[in-house]
Image: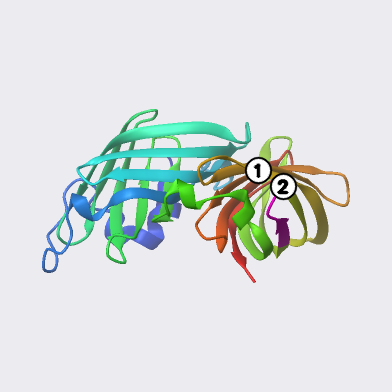
Amino acid sequence: MRISGFLTVLAWTFIATPVFSQVQIGGGVCSPATLSGTYSLTLSGRDVSPAVAFVKVSQGVGTAAFDGAGKVTLTFANNTLAAAGTAQTWSGSYTMQGSCTGTVSITSGNAAAFSLVTYNSGKAFLITGQDGTYALTGSGGLLPTTAACSATQLSGTYAIAATGFFLTAGAVSGVNDVSGVLQLDGKSAITGTIYLAGAATNSTLNLTGQFALTQGCAGTGTVTDSSGKTYALQFLETGGGGGFLLSGANAGILFIGSGRTI
């Protein structure tokens, strides 16, 4: 790892420092069984050069499956500077102390080490760590059963909030913030307007396109903006039609965020 580790883990130093040796805190209310089931997952990574310029970024949306006994599998679609929507499956083991802090060790699909925190009675988690290429941070919440997810539930108007990067010739050229609204028709159509802000630009983009749930609560979409640019989208329905996780990418932009029903 280069200097990048310090950037991403700064906000979580109190959990990231003791990745492999943690001190018992509190009354012992958690155990590996506290995390059990399939959770949503957003996983973001970045790396910088010695000149403190971003040289690598990744943004993934998917699921984290904890078995309640120490095994974990992360399944997600990842956007990087090189490719959009790359399927990833990482698996390994996790620990959980009574203090509701622990570790994740990924040994298949990648080699990565994370600090782990669970909260809300095991219904949510945070991870922070590295895989030798990226400084990584992620989070998620317990999902409904996949039988409760369907395209028909994604019907209505959703407020969108996301952050990401501008790209030029396959390299990071700036950062962006995204907000706006998307309308999903419960079948396959997406329309909406998003506002894209950078350090020296503000753009209003009208979007039209299609979406589909492809496996369980996960799905994909494609939208085209008013200038003719096309974006590949990755969805994860978070239950009941009330919202979803969202990432998007094309040759000029990466972003990751969420949508919540209005």
- Badge 1 crowding class, 10 Å Cα cut-off, few under 14, some 14 to 19, many 20 or more, is some
User: Mark 1: which amino acid?
Assistant: Ala
Provide the residue designation for mark 2.
188
Does residue 52 show up?
Answer: yes
When asked about the image quadrant of residue 178, the answer is: bottom right
User: What's the image's color scheme?
Assistant: rainbow
Span colored in magenta: 182-188
The residue located at (72%, 47%) in the rendering is 188
Looking at the picture, which amino acid does disc 2 mark? Ser
Q: Nearer the viewer, residue 166 or 66?
A: 66
Residue indicated by mark 1:
212
Q: x, y percentage for residue 185?
A: 72, 56
Q: Left or right of 181: which side holds 5?
A: left
Q: Secondary structure at mark 2?
A: loop
Is residue 183 on the magenta stretch?
yes
Answer whether residue 178 is visible to the viewer in this image. no
Q: Image point 60% across, 36% down: which residue? A: 85
**In the rendered image, which quarter contains the N terminus?**
top left
**Other residues around mark 2 within 10 Å, as few (<14) / some (14–19) / many (≥20):** some
The reply to whether discs 1 and 2 touch (Cβ–Cβ < 8 Å) is yes
Q: Position of residue 158 (x, y in %)?
A: 66, 64
First in sequence: mark 1 or mark 2?
2
* Residue 220 appears left or right of 143: right
